[in-house]
Image (cartoon, rainbow, N blue to C red):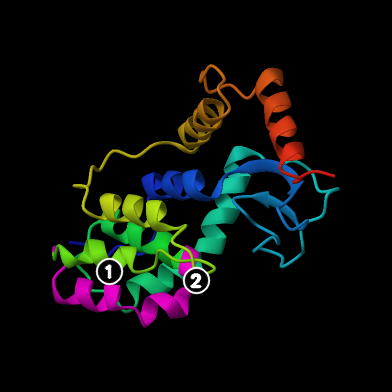
Amino acid sequence: MKEIRETSNKGIQFLIHEEGLVRRPYLDQVGIPTIGVGMTYYPDSGNRVTMKDPELTVSRAIQLFRLMLKSYEQAVWAPTRDDINHNQFDALTSLTYNIGTTGFKTSNLLKVVNEDKEDPKIQQAFEAWKNAGGKPILLARRKREAALYFTPYNEQQATDEQLYVNQVKYIQSKLGLPDDGIFGKNTKAAVIAFQKKKRTYS
């Protein structure tokens, strides 16, 4: 088996669902200009995101996200056994993107995976990272990552455009709109209204 070193499109879609993908600049919950998949800076230039920046294309947003992921992907493949499949790699990368590279490298999860990549205790090792701010608010995400880890891998991958359509459908379903995958004026208005309500826009 070839060693996995890069997140698959399925893994990218998984992370987009967890982190969100917004093509134009917005203010996050603490008022920091953000774009794409939770990016506060552009990984190719190092420049900070501003509210005056142009809207990203789908391919550009995913390209930048993949670039930003490289350090997290390296943190997964370097210390991890070589025979994990792509779903396992993607799940571990999602966790690492959330908890940081040092957290993963020193985790019991890495130890258990390297001893036996099919060990049922891996589920508990994921869930051990459920807390943020002293509360188990990340438990649902940890369960989804563990479920992805134990899902048999399918070689068929989605295109970048399918990734974006799927994300639009996901947003529409969350907002109670018809999930047709088209980011039209109704969807745009609903997203802006939701973001204003959450104080993500000035």
Q: Establish if 106 lies above or below 54.
A: below
Mark 1 sits on what residue? Answer: 125
User: Mark 1 is on which residue type?
Assistant: Ala
Q: Establish if 88 lies above or below 21.
A: below
Q: In the figure, is residue 92 to the left or right of 132?
A: left
Outermost residue on the front side: it is: 135
What is the secondary structure assignment of the residue under circle 2? helix
| CA separation in Å, label 2 and label 1 | 22 Å
Name the residue rendered at 50%, 46% in the picture. 16
Q: Is residue 101 magenta?
A: yes
What is the secondary structure assignment of the residue under circle 1? helix
- Region rendered in magenta: 98-118
User: Mark 2 is on which residue type?
Assistant: Ser
Which is nearer the eye, 192 or 96? Answer: 192
Q: Position of residue 88 (x, y in %)?
A: 27, 58
Q: Position of residue 72 (x, y in %)?
A: 46, 68
Q: Establish if 166 lies above or below 32.
A: above
Mark 2 sits on what residue? Answer: 71
Q: Position of residue 119 (x, y in %)?
A: 13, 66
Q: Position of residue 43 (x, y in %)?
A: 64, 64
Give the position of the C terminus as an image quadrant.
top right
Give the position of the N terminus as an image quadrant.
bottom left
